[in-house]
Image (tube, grey):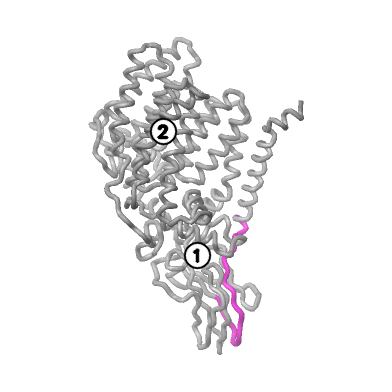
Amino acid sequence: MKKEFIYLFILIFPIFFASRALFHAGFFRTVDDISVVRINYMEKELRRNNWLNNFPVRLSGELSNNYGYPLYLFYAPLTYYAGAILKILFPLSHIVATKYIYVFPLIFGPFAFYFAARQKMRPFPALVASTFFTLFPYRGFNTYVRGAVAEAWAISFMPLAFGGLFLLQKKKPVGAVIFALSCFLILVSHNIVGFLFLGFTFVYGLLFFLKNKNFWKYLFLALGMSAFFLIPMLYYLKVIRVTYLDVNTTYILGTLIPADKLLNIQKERSLYGEGLLMGISGILFPFIVGGLIYYGYKKYTRHKIFREKFFWGISALILYILLFKPFEFFWQMTMPVTGILQFTWRLLALLAFIIPLFLGLWINDISSLFVKSALTVAVVVSCIIFTANFKPEAYSYFYEYQPEGLCATTSNQDEYLPIWVKGCPPPRTPLEISSKGSIKITEDNSLTVKADVAVEKPGELRINKFYFPGWHVLVDGEESQLDYNFSKDGIFRTSLSPGEHQVEVVYKKTEIMWLSDLFSLTSFSILLYKLWKLRPAHKAIRR
């Protein structure tokens, strides 16, 4: 333990260089400057007296000019839960809470990687690989340029998932539990990276866990735990607008890197294209190829123990070269599936784990002190270059963030709005009547509106909320039929007969949401049962 402590202590230094900017006074602007708003509005939903109807949180009642916005149903909710819970539990400002959310993957990820690496290699190679993972440029780019904190969280949980698998290879049942829990965390951190991770893990399972029942059982258990998010998201995807799917060809093909950059050393900061590589090419590409030659030789000389290590090198090479224009044909052929990635450099989310692991495995296995030293020096030099990625362009002071744009969402304007919403209507009162009468609102918490309504002749009650499955209108305690196709604004209405009425407009979970919640609760119960069975006291009783 003392020996491990020394290596972990050394690992703190690269972690410090990666995260120190977040401990600077003030905050900084990013491309996706929306995390603060999403945390604030998640907190509002958690504090709202509507837990039974909207937990897990799917709909923000106040986003999109108070018309309601199903953001958390479709996009990566875990980071926003974490930020909101921090604000609820501690007296933190929204800026400070967001900075904690930003810094978490920068600190947690390297220790998780060291845990995974130690299942496959000695402490020194594990430290070198962990240092490279810590300062991997895409991780800094996500935090300080894009502000893609949800993706940063997903990347930080990947080493924990594979660490669990490496334990499972050693016949340690706790590895399967760690794997399932990590898969769940990845999927609810960032759904796109989660699907990318699932695809890669499925291939890895076919090659190395094909007959291992625990691998497949716990993989499906992870999907079960994520059901509350995945099932409604996929089920309702057909009724919402996903803007990036309309332009995915432009995005995917436009982010391919020219072939002449394959061996260049990039130092400049850049949002798109080759600037993302930030030193990977030129220094590390030859070592990836060299490692493949080394493990290929070992494999073909009947050293079967090198088969998995060869797999990691091949994966690194394939995913790396797919970033370049000569492989445009691959993206064109697979566009119906790969288009959901939005950008080719989303593959760097996997490479952030695979390349450091492969280099660590190579350093661990080679016997030549000269080659081992050369690899280590290359990694250190690369990390020094990479530190430029782990700081913002400038620090600023922001005391209040608001949803921006006409739609007042936190995405690309109408992203994730229902397809029957044709524009971005201005703010209005929650209820309106078409005929002469009166409305007295007695309760309005955005997801529940109660009112006393009186009309002199037959008319309609218009509810200025974007209709989404789950909205109900009760007139005098009776469910009333809704119409949401009458207006380009995507709002809904119901009919009223002459007289006085008590009206309640309420959002409730749909049957598919309840079913998915039950599926997740059952899966979590199974995981807890598996954990209970792993207790040392339980094993002693069985003996």
Label 2 environment density (alpha carbons within 10 Å; few <14, some 14–19, many ≥20): some
- The percent coordinates of residue 506 (x first, y second) are 58, 69
Q: Amino acid at mark 2?
A: Ile
- Of helix, strand and loop, which one carries label 1? loop
Residue lying at 36% horizontally and 43% vertically, measured from the top left: 142
User: Distance between the Cα atoms at labels 2 and 1?
Assistant: 42 Å
Extreme-front residue of the structure: 2
Query: In the rendered image, which quarter is residue 476 located in?
Result: bottom right
Query: Is residue 136 toward the left or the right of residue 309 in the image?
Result: left
On the question of residue 332 being in view, the answer is no
- Mark in front: 2 vs 1: 2
Q: How many marks?
A: 2
Q: Please tell me the numbered disc located at residue 18.
A: none
Residue 291 versus residue 401: which sits nearer the camera? Answer: 401
| Residue at left offset 30%, top offset 39% | 389
Residue 32, position in %: x, y?
A: 36, 52
Residue located farthest toward the top when viewing the structure as drawn: 301
Please name the residue shown 47% across and 60% down the image.
41
Q: As shown in the figure, which amino acid type bears the numbered disc 1? A: Gly
Question: Do tag 2 and tag 1 residues touch (Cβ < 8 Å)?
Answer: no
Is 57 on the left or on the right of 10, as rendered? right
**What residue is drawn where x is 50% and y is 52%?**
86
For the record, the magenta segment spans 494-512
Relative image position of residue 232 (x, y in whole percent): 55, 53
Residue position marked by numbered label 2 in the rendering: 12
Quadrant (top left/top right/bottom left/bottom right) for the C terminus: top right
Work out whether residue 90 can be spotted.
yes
Residue 210: name its quadrant. top right
- Label 1 sits on residue: 61
- Residue 300 % position (x, y): 44, 12
Residue 499 forms part of the magenta stretch: yes
